[in-house]
Image (tube, helix red, strand yellow):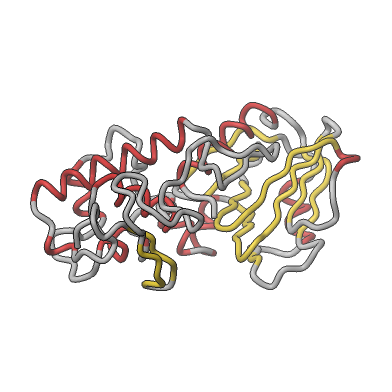
């Protein structure tokens, strides 16, 4: 699952390798996937993109936004695999493929589910509530992401839910998914099941600091070791709360692994207090 840090890395690589290239062709849903969602049909994508130059890319939450010179953009998010290769090395198993005048192709494949939208910013805000939310919030690594904003965004002072509910659901912080959250909570020494309303002022501040710290560390390491960049290279951040790990990397006691709120949580009952 591409989350905030991985989205930033992909954006940097697009700006480095695709910025300034012209799109000569586009192919959507060539290898059909019922959980890949598009904003228009093939002909509309072609009309919006072909013979247009890529002016750059940006990141909003877990949306990777590829900007086109005519004011349109390609907005990609969720469970994606990217590949940027010479055209002759491309594959047929993709849900969106861009052909460039550099003899290269950008292929994007869906694993579980994905958004592969195209349109102007206003069109996409109407088409997708997730996109609309993602482009309206403050990035966790921005100077504007204050402690007060963090508390307000997560509804920390009045939420009745757990930390997982407050941070990784309901689009409170778009792009902060379960994988990154588990790393944040381990760093903050807090259980994913702990109630938001039970946090002390010190725990609230610690959670805020760990959120920025972990997202920054993953970004600096070019992603988690479970994620891949445009060229298939894995990130260098070692995931601590991994399904492959059975014991806490700190106290070495057994980790708890269980389903909770629609996904797996992994935590140390000794180090992370509920």
Total numbered badges shown on the rendered structure: 0
Q: Quadrant of the N terminus?
A: bottom right
Q: Nearer the viewer, residue 55 or 86?
A: 86
Splitting the image into 4 quarters, where does residue 32 fall? bottom right
Measured from the top left, where is residue 71 in percent x and y? 61, 42
Q: Is residue 154 above or below residue 235?
A: below
Measured from the top left, where is residue 27 in percent x and y? 80, 54
Measured from the top left, where is residue 23 in percent x and y? 78, 40
Q: Quadrant of the C terminus?
A: bottom left
Splitting the image into 4 quarters, where does residue 12 fall? top right
Measured from the top left, where is residue 39 in percent x and y? 63, 63
Q: Is residue 77 above or below residue 236?
A: below
Check the image and name the residue furthest to the right.
Answer: 88
| Rendered residue at 56%/38% (across/down) | 235
**Residue 240 appears left or right of 77:** left
Splitting the image into 4 quarters, where does residue 145 fall? top left
């Amino acid at each position: 699952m591409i989350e905030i840090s991985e989205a930033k890395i992909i954006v940097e690589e697009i700006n480095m390798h695709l910025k300034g290239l012209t799109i000569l062709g586009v192919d959507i849903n060539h290898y059909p996937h019922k959980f890949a969602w598009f904003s228009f049909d093939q002909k509309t994508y072609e009309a919006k993109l072909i013979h247009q130059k890529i002016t750059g890319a940006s990141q909003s939450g877990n949306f990777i936004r590829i900007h086109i010179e005519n004011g349109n953009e390609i907005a990609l998010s969720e469970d994606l695999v990217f590949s940027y290769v010479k055209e002759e090395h491309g594959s047929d198993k993709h849900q969106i493929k861009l052909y460039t005048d550099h003899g290269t192709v950008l292929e994007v494949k869906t694993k579980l589910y994905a958004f592969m939208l195209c349109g102007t910013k206003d069109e996409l805000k109407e088409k997708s509530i997730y996109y609309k939310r993602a482009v309206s919030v403050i990035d966790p690594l921005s100077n504007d992401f204050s402690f007060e904003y963090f508390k307000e965004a997560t509804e920390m002072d009045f939420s009745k839910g757990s930390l997982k509910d407050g941070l990784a659901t309901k689009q409170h912080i778009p792009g902060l998914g379960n994988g990154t959250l588990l790393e944040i909570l381990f760093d903050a020494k807090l259980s994913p099941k702990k109630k938001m309303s039970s946090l002390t002022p010190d725990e609230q501040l610690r959670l805020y600091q760990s959120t920025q710290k972990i997202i920054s560390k993953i970004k600096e390491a070019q992603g988690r070791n479970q994620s891949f960049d445009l060229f298939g290279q894995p990130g260098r951040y070692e995931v601590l709360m991994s399904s492959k790990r059975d014991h806490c990397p700190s106290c070495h006691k057994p980790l708890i692994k269980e389903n909770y709120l629609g996904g797996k949580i992994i935590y140390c009952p000794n180090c992370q207090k509920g």
